[in-house]
Amino acid sequence: MTVDPAYQPATRFLEGRVAVVTGGGSGIGLGMATAMASHGATVILACRRVEVGEPVAAELRESGLAVSCVKCDVTVAEEVATAITTAVDKFGRLDCLIHNAVAGTFDGAGPLTQASATGWKMLVASSLRASFDCAQASYPHLKDSKGSLILLTSASGMEGSVGLPLYGVVKAAQRTLAKGLAAEWGPDGIRVNTVAPLALTPAFDRGLAADPSLIDRLESSTPLGRIGDPTRDVGPVAVFLASDLSRHVTGQTIVADGGGFRGL
Amino acid sequence: MIHTLLVGTGTFVESLKEGLKAQGHVVACVEPTRSSDTNPHESDLDSPAIGIKDAAEQLGHTDLIVHVPAAPDEPKKIVNQTEDEWIIACEAPLHEAIAVARASHPILAVRPNPCASDSNARLIWVLPTIALGGSAGYVASGAAFEGIRALSKGAAKQWGADGITTFVLAVNPTVFLGNNNGPSADGVRDAAVPALGRTGDPVTDLAPLLDLLANPKAAFTTGGTIVADGGIWMAL
């Protein structure tokens, strides 16, 4: 997926807001970041590889969007804290943190009995431990702004996954992590929600390379008949959860997959 | 006669053992290896469950494996939690559950005619209902327990053809949290009053449900969750 600067919403719901998106340099993270910036937010792409994130941020800036990039490997707690501190120091506030980055998705693929400890370790470090680090680092700033924390989950976390069982485990954990945080932080005015997307991304492309029939199977089982676009289909969900439109919504999951999963 | 392997430790597990024996089960208990709690990823995926194979061999054959993961004794806000406390509450129980699942597969799959309609090779996790709804003070452990529910579903899908079924028994947090002999969960206790007016006794309320799920007549259910909390969580 490339940058989609042509996305120009008629209304700007995030004017004056500051958001950090981990894994914002590509895929769904970039789609959400682009949509949020298009709605007026100042967005910081927190990217493990700056050489990937910075050109993307530059391209969005050329389109008039307020997007910058900061180095952040989410498996390193200090880099998570630094990314958030940098955003607050530079832009004065933090209204929304989206923890989207995940690694090791396909390392946990296949039979449970053959899953590797290395793949599991990477999944946990990049999703769960990183959520813990994101939560701790962002809490005082989100408390100040009455802001919003958004975690990424997946239908595989709700219905279990035969192909990616350990990915399903961490995505399920993310979901109840968000529910618990919603309960814990509600009195501080912080909302915590999850998004379960399915969209065309580089990760999806890798899955497609391994299984070319995947897209036909998914599209045929999706009521809307197509796989989502990160900016135009998933991005607005992040905009909604980051904005005052969702001011009374917390502890919830929004599934943005064209209707393929309807189990909630 | 159902042969049951109970994986866990503490007063709650002891009560389940007593209740299963009262149901006529032959029960063996095994404690998971939790010495590496604060750095679970230093070990491989199987280390926490290394005792299961020997315990199962002592049973002769195993029909039912029940895993009760550890839970924190006291609530703690996530902003006050250290990294080690996070690991103990979230990552270590997940790691342990994966190890138990992996150790359980060869034990349950070797049963004669595991796919026969009169056979039921079952792996059950007993978890508190905070897996379903989350809870302030138990953010980390709630996340772990919901992860284990997804593990149960994934295992059910992968192992159905092997004749292995899985299930989660979701119980009232007040009878579960602090199951390592610590105090119960004060932060959760007052959250709601059960419709049945009591939180549930492991011996007389929960063990019979494990027995029910172990019955071959229940073998067509897999990957599901039964809530046994006296009627608090009704959102399924």
Image: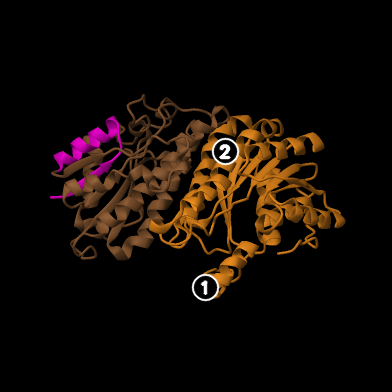
Chain colours: A orange, B brown
Given the image, what chain letter belongs to the residue carrying mark 1?
A
Q: Nearer the viewer, residue A186 or B127?
A: B127
Residue A205 included in the magenta stretch of the image: no
* Residue, disc 1: A217
The numbered dot on residue A128 is none
* Residue A201 is at least partly visible in this image: no
**Which dot, 1 or 2, sits closer to the camera?**
2
- Sort mark 1 into few (<14), some (14-19) or many (20+) by Cα contacts within 10 Å: few
Whether A88 is drawn above or below A240: the answer is: above
Q: Mark 1–mark 2 contact, CB under 8 Å?
A: no
* Image x and y of residue B1, in percent: 12, 50
Q: Say which element carries label 2.
A: helix
| Residue B190 position within the rendered picture, expressed as x and y whole percent measured from the top left | 41, 27
Q: Which three-letter amino acid code belongs to the residue tagged 1? A: Arg
List the residue tagged with mark 2. Answer: A132
* Left or right relative to B123: residue A88: right
> What type is the residue that disc 2 sits on?
Phe
Residue range corresponding to the magenta coloring: B1-23
Q: Tell me if A254 is positioned left or right of B61 in this view.
A: right
How many numbered marks have been drawn onto this rendered protein structure?
Answer: 2
Q: Earlier in the sequence, mark 1 or mark 2?
A: 2
Q: What residue sits 50% from the left and 54% below the top?
A: A167
